[in-house]
Image (spheres, grey):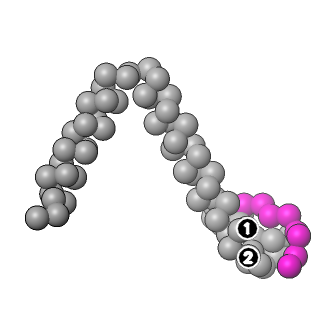
Amino acid sequence: MSTSSTSPSSSGRYYTSQGGFPSSMHEADRPLQAYLEHAMEGIEEYARNEPWAFAAWVFGIGFVLGWKLKPW
């Protein structure tokens, strides 16, 4: 397995230093991981700043999912 460094291109895709595609899935999922980490930080910050609104959203989403996905 190659241990080459990766960097994003202008299209946002990651390529290896040799100019090809990543050689493993671990290298390929880095953009997704960064996106998810950024999204989670934003959600956590919102929950800290607006705890009642966040609790209402969580309750509402849970209620709708429970209502639509009931097992009987």
Question: Is residue 71 part of the magenta span, yes or no?
Answer: no
Residue 58 in view here: yes
Q: Which residue is mark 1?
A: 27
Residue 10 in view here: no
Q: Give the magenta-colored segment's residue range.
A: 1-8
Label 2 residue SS = loop
Which x, y percent locates residue 56? 26, 30
- What amino acid is at disc 2? Ser
Q: Which residue is mark 2?
A: 24
Which x, y percent locates residue 72? 11, 64
Which x, y percent locates residue 66? 19, 52
Query: Residue 21 vs residue 65: left or right?
Result: right
Instruction: Decide: is 8 above or below 4.
Output: above
Instruction: Please tell me which residue lies in front, 40 or 35.
Output: 40
Instruction: Decide: is 24 above or below 32.
Output: below
Most prominent secondary structure in the magenta stretch?
A: loop
Labelled pair 1, 2 in contact (Cβ < 8 Å) = yes
User: In the figure, residue 3 lies in which quadrant?
Assistant: bottom right
Query: Residue 66 vs residue 10: left or right?
Result: left
